[in-house]
Structure formats: structure tokens, C-alpha cells
Image (cartoon, grey):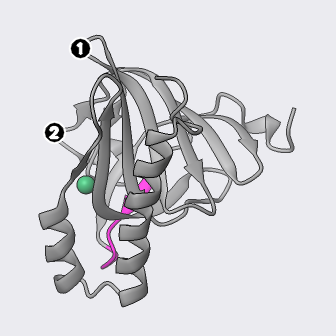
Amino acid sequence: MDAHGAYLGRPMPIHITKWDGSYHRRWPVYYVQRKGTLYLAQSRAGELVTRTAEAADDPNPWPIPSSGPVYLWEDRWYNVARGLRNGRIRYYVNIATPVTFDGASFHCVDLDLDVSWFTDEAPCVLDEDEFLDHAERMRYPADVIKHARATVDEVLTMIAARAFPFDRA
Ligand SMILES: [Mg+2]
């Protein structure tokens, strides 16, 4: 058991904000373990994602479609959820700042860009328009823009190589 073994199975929401500090999403997950800089969590089908930090405050939450592992790193600019969509395996990669963990929840800043990969087809990069729009409106620093773009390339390379965590296609 790792040093964080006491957290095993505990609900640990991921609080996701935007670069300007506005609240974006509360993503409920359960803590599994820490391994080096990786936090492994688990999402459960039917649990509700909300636009508010307090789940009860969102009148229109939506359910997570399938259970699956969630990979969060404190030194990588993305996080990954693996699940099933209509019987197909899908990895969903959110480009975001490295995650922080305070013992009760995770936090990261969403940087719009996503990579969606159904493992029986080529991955696609989503939300380019939103990224360009927010980069301008929220004044992303040049190095953040560079980092986000480089991370998309890094993720696509890892997918092509079926590198962890993209090795369970
Ligand atoms: Mg996005």
C-alpha cells in the first residue's frame, strides 16, 4: 500500500477551472492509488458531472456514461479517462495543467484542447476553436500555449506507440 493508501476508494472530486479562474467542472472520481507522479482514480457510470463546485448547486448535471480508470499526473499537462462508448473503448484526453491534490480533491486548469481516441480508429483533436478563442480572451501566456500544443503532439505520439496509459486498446 502506498503512502496514500488511506485514501483508497474515497470520493475525490476533480475541480476543474479555466485560466481566468472561473469554475468549469466538478468531475466526481474515486481515489485508487498514487504511483510516482501518477494519481490513479476511477470514475463510476451514472455519477454526476456538474458546472458547480458543490454538486447539489447545478440544476442540470449529467451522468458519466461509463465506469473506467482516470489517470492524473502532477507533472504532465493532460489527464486521461478510459471508458466504453457504445461498446467501443475510448480514451478521452483533456489537455490541462498538471493536477494538484490536497487530500480531499484534485484541481487542474482546463486548456480546452482534447484528444478523443476510439481505439478502433484514428485519434482526433477537439476544441481547437475554443482554444484559440480562450487563448486570446483569457490571455494564455505564450509558454502555456506552446505547452498545450506540444502536449497534444506528445499524446498523439504516445497513442501511436500504444504507450501507457494507451496500452489497453
Ligand atoms: Mg475541451
Which quadrant of the figure has residue 32?
A: top right
Q: In this picture, which residue range is highlighted in magenta?
A: 15-21
Which quadrant of the figure has residue 20?
A: bottom left
**Label disc, if present, on residue 23 of the rendered structure:** none
Q: Mark 2 is on which residue type?
A: Asn
Q: Residue furthest top?
A: 87
Query: Quadrant for ligand 1?
Result: bottom left
Measured from the top left, where is residue 132 in percent x and y?
A: 17, 74
Which residue appears at 18% of the width and 63% of the height?
128
Q: Nearer the viewer, residue 162 or 19?
A: 162
Residue 123 shown in magenta:
no
Q: Can you say whether 40 is above or below 145 in the image? A: above
Q: For residue 91, say whether it is visible.
A: yes
Mark 1 or 2: the one toward you:
1
Q: Nearer the viewer, residue 165 or 40?
A: 165
Tell me the quarter of the image containing the N terminus. Answer: top right
- Circle 1 residue: 86
Measured from the top left, where is residue 46 in percent x and y?
A: 33, 21
**Other-residue count near label 2 (Cα within 10 Å), few / some / many at <14 / 14–19 / ≥20:** few
Quick check: 42 left or right of 95?
right
- Circle 2 residue: 60
Q: Earlier in the sequence, mark 1 or mark 2?
A: 2
Q: Secondary structure at mark 2?
A: loop
Q: Secondary structure at mark 1?
A: loop
Which residue appears at 36% of the width and 89% of the height?
142
Is label 2 within 8 A of ligand 1 (CB to nearest ligand atom)?
no
Q: CA–CA distance between discs 1 and 2?
A: 23 Å
Q: For residue 43, say whether it is visible.
A: no
* Total numbered labels placed on residues in the image: 2
Measured from the top left, where is residue 93 in percent x and y?
A: 39, 46
Q: Mark 1 is on which residue type?
A: Asn
Q: Can you say whether 17 is above or below 123 in the image? A: below
